[in-house]
Image (spheres, rainbow, N blue to C red):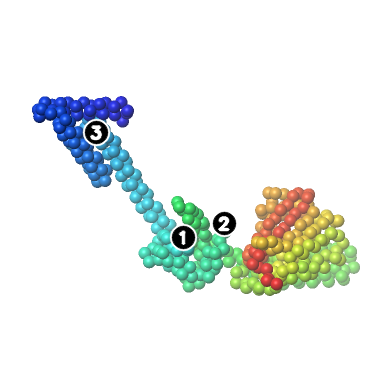
Amino acid sequence: MRLTNLIFFLLGQLLLVIIATFLLGTLLGGFYHSALIIISAYLILMLIYVFSLKESLQHGFKIKWLGTRGFLSEVNSSIEALSKSRWRYRKRFAQLIKEVNALASAIPDAGIIIDEFNNIEWCNRSSLTLLGVDQDRDIGQKVGNIIRFPAFNHYLKNHKMDNFIDIEDSNNKRFLRFRIVEYHDHSSRTKKFISVRDVTAQSKLNQIRKDFIANASHELKTPLTTIKGYSEIINEDSKEQELANFANQITLQADRMNKIIEDLLSLSKIENSDMELNDDLIDVGSIINQVLESYESLNKKINFKLSIECDKKLISDESLFYSIVENLISNAHRYTDEGGDVLISWSADAEYATFTVQDTGIGIPQESIERITERFYRVDKGRNAKTGGTGLGLSIVKHALDRMGAELIIESELQVGSSFSCRFPNKRLAKD
Ligand code: ADP
């Protein structure tokens, strides 16, 4: 609708009113009264038109009496087109909602939306089969009252963006993987999306793998002890130097294999979720000193420095903490050249209590940092062979920290040094 159309329309209407007033005036013999009658009639007509437009918009019917030509019919058809497109949009929107609902019902994972007070706002059909959350019954209920696993309620309070937990549903003999994602709705209210997947098959396979490693390691121990015993006897009793050297090599390699087996067994023990962790009161300084004692007699001299800024005890499992300290100090010792420095510190701030081992050793290439906690990952085979490691030390550290609810932060620069920090939440510190 252009401006010229509007001007023509207004001029036309004015002309019409004037002509009608003139005609009625001549008929009645008075222009004043006839102007009043015509303008009133014109206003009434406009009111009828506006009213009809309103009705046509609300109920979607066509105002037939306006015809197909002229300014008013143009206004009418524009409004009609607008209302049609609005209707089409609503229909498409309703279809989309239907499709999303159908999709949500079809997926095998459970999906639940909860508000900032943990009340259930929406859930899909699988929520009923996996968790017993009913679309018709449980909307508006507290999610913790319906999903009653203690581990889930703990996770609900402490979840992070990228983590998940696997929970055993012993009643139904299955394992469920819970993942919580936080987001903001259109009015910036914080909501959470809980997705739950049945990972029973995956967990069983994982368990088979863990059991296999634990059993195989255990079975290897006995023959290895025998091999080591005989090689030691041959080494001691042999008159031939060459034979004694061979036997010595066998003993050394048997020792190495034994260490790998010990590490594999520790790792599977740590990974075993049935293993209960103790809440010991750990004197971190004394554990560090105990571990350092074994380095005093070694030939390779490293300058160990200690910085204990936090005098509070750590509440956690002492044997796991010991193996963390032992592995990190052993690595710092092995991967730092003679005469280098290793700083071992224990400190706390408002959020975390941190145990750090920092060395001036050979460092780790950036691309390897995120992989060195994998089992048997080696930066390069040469450096491992020289230092006699098992390739499992950092794996043990990482898994132990996971179990203790702590995290490992690794920073390193090649030929400058490395720093391994174990960060415990502050609530793990004893009060006095
Ligand atoms: P390993 O028994 O081989 O030392 P770890 O799991 O303890 O096994 O370490 C994995 C790899 O990470 C090592 O092979 C080594 O290359 C690297 N690494 C670990 N600690 C350090 C460190 N302090 N400095 C440099 N490299 C390190």
Looking at the image, tell me whether mark 3 or mark 1 is earlier in sequence order: 3
- Nearest the eye: 261 or 404: 404
Give the percent coordinates (x, y) of residue 413. 74, 50
Image quarter of the C terminus: bottom right
Secondary structure of residue under mark 2 = loop
Residue 208 lies, with reference to residue 66, above or below; the image says: below
Would residue 311 be visible to someone looking at this image? Answer: yes
- Location of residue 346 (image quadrant): bottom right
Q: Could you tell whether 319 is left or right of 201 in the image?
A: right
Give the percent coordinates (x, y) of residue 39. 19, 33
Would residue 256 be visible to someone looking at this image? Answer: no
Q: Could you tell whether 68 is left or right of 221 in the image?
A: left
Give the percent coordinates (x, y) of residue 315. 67, 70
Query: Which residue is drawn at the image coordinates 81% and 63% (left, top)?
Result: 249
| Spatial CA span between label 2 and label 3 | 60 Å
| Spatial CA span between label 1 and label 2 | 20 Å
Amino acid type of disc 2? Asp
